[in-house]
């Protein structure tokens, strides 16, 4: 169960600019709207006024019934029956006040319209306060991320059954998405990446019509949403390995090096450690492996925060990250090696920072 009161406290404790917040929800859902309400679904065009102890949600007739069913006890629902009622409600709570908005989300045209309608003294960007609040996950958030991970890992365990000579990357990506939904997911948390052979050396590859051949890499980077929250998991397979071949030996050298890097980074994760430490440990291991064979072949950061967004704002495993890890953070651990013209290996799990260290979700 979402604790709206605690989430309001976290946002306003982090905000130095405003004690009132105004959020708009459109077809492109503002993640902070979901964070403060716990609502799933679109709620297109809805307006949320957040106060330190109370929320006022303005909804259209299309959303009114479901909003009444889903509303937390701290929320008042207002039906947007007319422009006059919308304006009166906004002015009741916002007129003459400094109002915080999610400046990373609200379009400028809408910003001007809402400022005029509300009579607010100022609209100021408090997106950093939202990011700060979301950096540390509560128990309900961790449960949802764990659920999203359970679903996508179940799909990944089953997907090799559909590998066969000549199948395309698109076909495997489609099947993976179908499996995740079959197992309880709400849909992909980002476009599923499936790449065969040399294509696996491109980290943000888009699945196409390449066909699967024996003794080649299959890299799958995927996630699902579950109760508003995301998972992000990568697995690298070798299809029909020719174990006596030189190519297979090279592929296994890459795989073992990446797996070792992931586990070494994982061991360093604990509260109080700078976020840069796990990345640098993984990068150093990859650079030194096999007398420098893969030096410079780890071409991205080790991990990003995960939550309502698959790349949630917050502390990550970045080479320049100065923030210290804290209990309740969820960050991906995803080292990789990419050799152009040959292929790539990436292994990724979502990691919870606990008092005792890292826990794979």
Image (tube, rainbow, N blue to C red):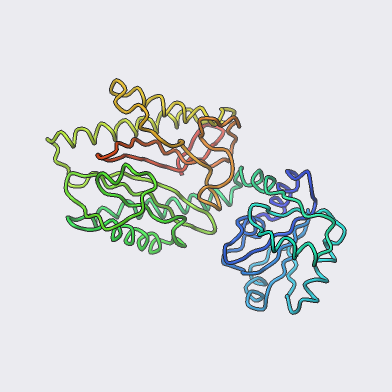
The residue shown at (48%, 49%) is: 146
Location of residue 147 in the rendering, given as x and y in whole percent from the top left corner = 47, 53
Left or right placement of residue 121 versus residue 241 in this view: right
Q: Name the quarter where the N terminus is drawn.
A: bottom right
Left or right placement of residue 234 versus residue 74 in this view: left
| The residue positioned farthest toward the top in the image shown | 291
| The residue positioned farthest toward the left in the image shown | 244
Location of residue 190 in the rendering, given as x and y in whole percent from the top left corner = 45, 55
Choose top left, top right, bottom left or bottom right for residue 320: top right
Location of residue 282 in the rendering, given as x and y in whole percent from the top left corner = 42, 29
Left or right placement of residue 87 versus residue 302 in this view: right
Asked if residue 285 is positioned above or below residue 169 in the image, the reply reads above
The residue shown at (41%, 28%) is: 283
Looking at this view, is 348 or 29 the one in front? 29
Asked if residue 177 is positioned above or below residue 60 in the image, the reply reads above
Looking at this view, is 99 or 7 the one in front? 99
Looking at this view, is 351 or 319 the one in front? 319
Left or right placement of residue 311 versus residue 127 in this view: left
The residue shown at (63%, 74%) is: 63
The residue shown at (14%, 41%) is: 242
Choose top left, top right, bottom left or bottom right for residue 334: top left
Location of residue 340 in the rendering, given as x and y in whole percent from the top left corner = 29, 38
């Amino acid at each position: 169960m979402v604790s709206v009161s605690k989430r309001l406290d976290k946002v306003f404790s982090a905000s130095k600019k405003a004690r009132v917040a105004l959020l708009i929800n459109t077809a492109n859902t503002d993640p902070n709207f979901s964070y403060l309400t716990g609502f799933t679904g679109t709620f297109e065009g809805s307006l949320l006024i957040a106060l330190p102890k109370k929320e006022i949600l303005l909804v259209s007739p299309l959303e009114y019934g479901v909003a009444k069913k889903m509303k937390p006890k701290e929320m008042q629902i207002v039906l947007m029956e007319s422009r006059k009622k919308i304006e009166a409600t906004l002015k009741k709570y916002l007129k003459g006040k400094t109002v915080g908005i999610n400046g990373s989300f609200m379009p400028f045209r809408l910003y001007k319209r809402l400022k005029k309608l509300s009579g607010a003294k100022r609209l100021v960007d408090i997106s950093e306060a939202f990011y700060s609040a979301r950096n540390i996950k509560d128990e309900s958030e961790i449960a949802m991320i764990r659920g999203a991970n359970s679903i996508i890992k179940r799909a990944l365990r089953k997907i090799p059954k559909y590998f066969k000579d000549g199948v395309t990357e698109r076909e495997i990506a489609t099947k993976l998405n179908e499996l995740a939904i079959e197992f309880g997911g709400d849909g992909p948390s980002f476009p599923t990446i499936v790449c065969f052979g040399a294509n696996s050396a491109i980290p943000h590859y888009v699945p196409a019509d390449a066909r699967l051949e024996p003794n080649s890499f299959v890299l799958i980077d995927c996630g699902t949403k579950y109760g508003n929250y995301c998972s992000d998991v990568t697995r690298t397979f070798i299809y029909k390995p020719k174990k006596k071949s030189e190519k297979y030996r090279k592929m296994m050298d890459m795989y073992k090096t990446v797996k070792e890097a992931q586990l070494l980074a994982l061991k360093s994760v604990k509260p109080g450690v700078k976020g840069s430490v796990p990345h640098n440990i993984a990068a150093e291991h990859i650079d030194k492996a096999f007398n420098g064979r893969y030096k410079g072949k780890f071409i991205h950061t080790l991990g990003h925060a995960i939550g309502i967004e698959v790349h949630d704002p917050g502390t990550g495993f970045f080479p320049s990250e100065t923030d210290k890890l804290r209990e309740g953070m969820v960050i991906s651990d995803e080292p990789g090696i990419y050799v152009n013209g040959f292929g790539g290996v990436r292994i990724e799990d979502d990691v919870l920072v606990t008092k005792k260290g890292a826990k794979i979700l």
